[in-house]
Image (cartoon, coloured by chain):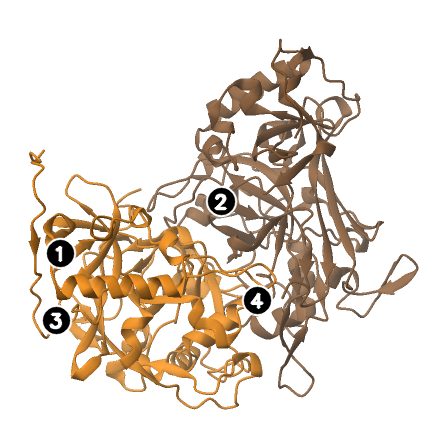
Chain colours: A brown, B orange
Amino acid sequence: MDVVRPGPAVRTRLEVPEDSLFGADNLPYGVFAPRGGEYRVGVRFGEFVIDLAAALDDSVFAASDLNAFLAQGPARWRAVRERVRELVSSEITTDAVHSLADVTLALPVRIGDYVDFYASIDHATNLGRLFRPDAEPLLPNWRHLPVGYHGRAGTVVVSGTEVVRPRGQRRTDSGVPDFGPSRRLDIEAELGFVVGVGSSLGTPIDISEVEDHLFGVALVNDWSARDIQAWEYQPLGPFLGKSFATSLSAWVTPLAALDSARIPLPEQTPPPLPYLSVDEPWGLDIELTVCWNGQVVSHPPYGRMYWSPAQMLAHMTANGAAARSGDLFASGTISGPEAGQRGSFIELSWGGAEPVEVGGERRTFLEDGDEVVITASARGVGGRRVGLGEVRGRVLPAGARG
Amino acid sequence: MDVVRPGPAVRTRLEVPEDSLFGADNLPYGVFAPRGGEYRVGVRFGEFVIDLAAALDDSVFAASDLNAFLAQGPARWRAVRERVRELVSSEITTDAVHSLADVTLALPVRIGDYVDFYASIDHATNLGRLFRPDAEPLLPNWRHLPVGYHGRAGTVVVSGTEVVRPRGQRRTDSGVPDFGPSRRLDIEAELGFVVGVGSSLGTPIDISEVEDHLFGVALVNDWSARDIQAWEYQPLGPFLGKSFATSLSAWVTPLAALDSARIPLPEQTPPPLPYLSVDEPWGLDIELTVCWNGQVVSHPPYGRMYWSPAQMLAHMTANGAAARSGDLFASGTISGPEAGQRGSFIELSWGGAEPVEVGGERRTFLEDGDEVVITASARGVGGRRVGLGEVRGRVLPAGARG
């Protein structure tokens, strides 16, 4: 234990490089623990973490998740963001500042329900071709609604958590399945959206009011065992092929930090039904980078996404389903039309038929020991970039924890 | 407020009729609030509710859900059950007893993840015929694994909660969907299984150890909007057609109360893979009753279920997915081979083509104001029956809360 000497508070000015992805325009929220300390809410500024409970003397941040703060709503989110911007542009008490390198990061939100969408037309088209080669790649409903399904909230893990290769039933050429470690372990590079203010059962969130409810954006790697998925998914959708782990970045960037990244949504044909329509639908100009064992293999462009975050949230609650603070919904794999823009390895390697060169080896799916790091940045103010926290994971052999 | 006079504790013997479905062999757990009081854990005995925190002087029961007690594990579950059986067979302090009619019941568990299976071969065959009339009703995977998917944990509601008819995209004859209140609102009569002791990420629950993890059984009505479901469910499964509400009975019957209801599982062809196999697989002899506006329309037989509860839990975690105390998994609709044994109205009315006579009217799906009550009882000791709590719900018009 360090010896703590009470004394006059020392104030300092935090220096962050002008071109930092985590400057004063960003200020994402996370949950951290200083060495030997308890988890609490922090804001990232450059390579610093600001302890909000200490800096703002506010107990809502002395919590192991963001949920209570999220539930306080947009006026409060704006006020806190303004206070933190003041702090980082002047001086802050050193007691409230930690070096990012010295803290442990945890899952930022307590996730009630986790929904995964399928909002990229390039990805849905690619997967349709691979999974149903004899049929139209896009099913008839795809252009009418954002297709989605519920994932397993209890196995969303924070970036850095190692992922054990799942075992499961694998389809074999004989038509009779066997059971064993997945041979087609894959990633899905996605954006995740964090619900701030929930909604009541029976009361949909109107698409015009989404910004009163939506707090921020994180990065998601929706690990997928393609062989398990291909065998199990009909007729009720993905289950064990996904539920072993979903990785979430430790930092949630508030929507307010992404004002400059807003772009018009690509045209939708046919026009969406009224409950999915607004006058000026917006997307986000965010580019992801997928790094496989240290080598960049893809740059998925979020800006091409067909369905918007607002449409996803309005659709998810259109039937009266309640949302809760801390709920997470993800975009589904982000892919662009070019080979170098695909957000999953099943697409990059075209179902395994076209191996990718990684570190001098020809690779298709993940091998034990592989590490995948997904990062992203958004268009910011004045040509600067706003970084999203990374989502990192390494594959452990099947049975490594069992 | 009542005036409370401290004084000597008065002890009494609780009288419950010999043929009660909620006698000393049953003793299900729930969460209740006495008038003006806070929620806490109770045990039902006949028409009484025993306040466990008061009766056993144990603060784990002074909670608004069963989760902390569930996490304590099977030895503790047995010990508490034994203590309660002693109490109800001798005398109990009146301070710890309430009349069931005087209390409010709440959701008994805080549900982390909710999974719904599809374990009845008669139901899966019927739905295959109705949804995919031109194909084999059972898909190739069905006899190899218990098909399941994640539902929305945040919209599981306690029995008695009114259900607002959901709006959603409905397929029309033109092939272009419209948006409006579901015209094919249905029920699904199911058993729900409550996880007591969870498991760690990466560590499957072995099928031989399921009874160290599984706490008890409840009743589920998995309300389903068939028109929404039919349009949205490919390729990722049910979503808004289910997520508006799932009703759970207020009482959870511990597995220990269902020893006499255990029966051999019907034969499985082909034999299940080793991770789904035990020497003596068991099912449960439980008969459900579906009551539509006061009229009994069906008696779904749980005893015919193809996949067992143990197989469902072992499968759900076979990929290393963690389970948490309070997680809920449900069997899927329970149907038998006879028309009077079907657990959903889409089956009872054969997709709406064969209306059912209800209260003198010809009916297919639910109309506003309809009420459905599902009850069930299991074979008990000495010819007696063990009751499961009812699951009740009435349909409100679309927009009733919006």
Residue type beneath disc 3: Ser
Answer left or right for A106 relative to B334: right
Residue named by callout 1: B92
Label 1 marks which chain's residue?
B
Q: Chain of mark 2?
A: A
Count of labels in the image = 4
For numbered disc 2, what is the local secondary structure? loop
Q: Chain of mark 3?
A: B
Q: Nearer the viewer, mark 4 or mark 1?
A: 1
Q: Picture coordinates of residue A141 (x, y %)?
A: 52, 60
Q: Which mark is residue A240?
A: 4
- Foreground: disc 3 or disc 1: 1
Residue depth check, mark 1 versus mark 2: number of the one nearer the observer = 1
Q: Which residue is mark 3?
A: B20
Q: Residue furthest top?
A: A8
On residue A327, which mark appears?
2
The amino acid type of the residue labelled 2 equals Asp
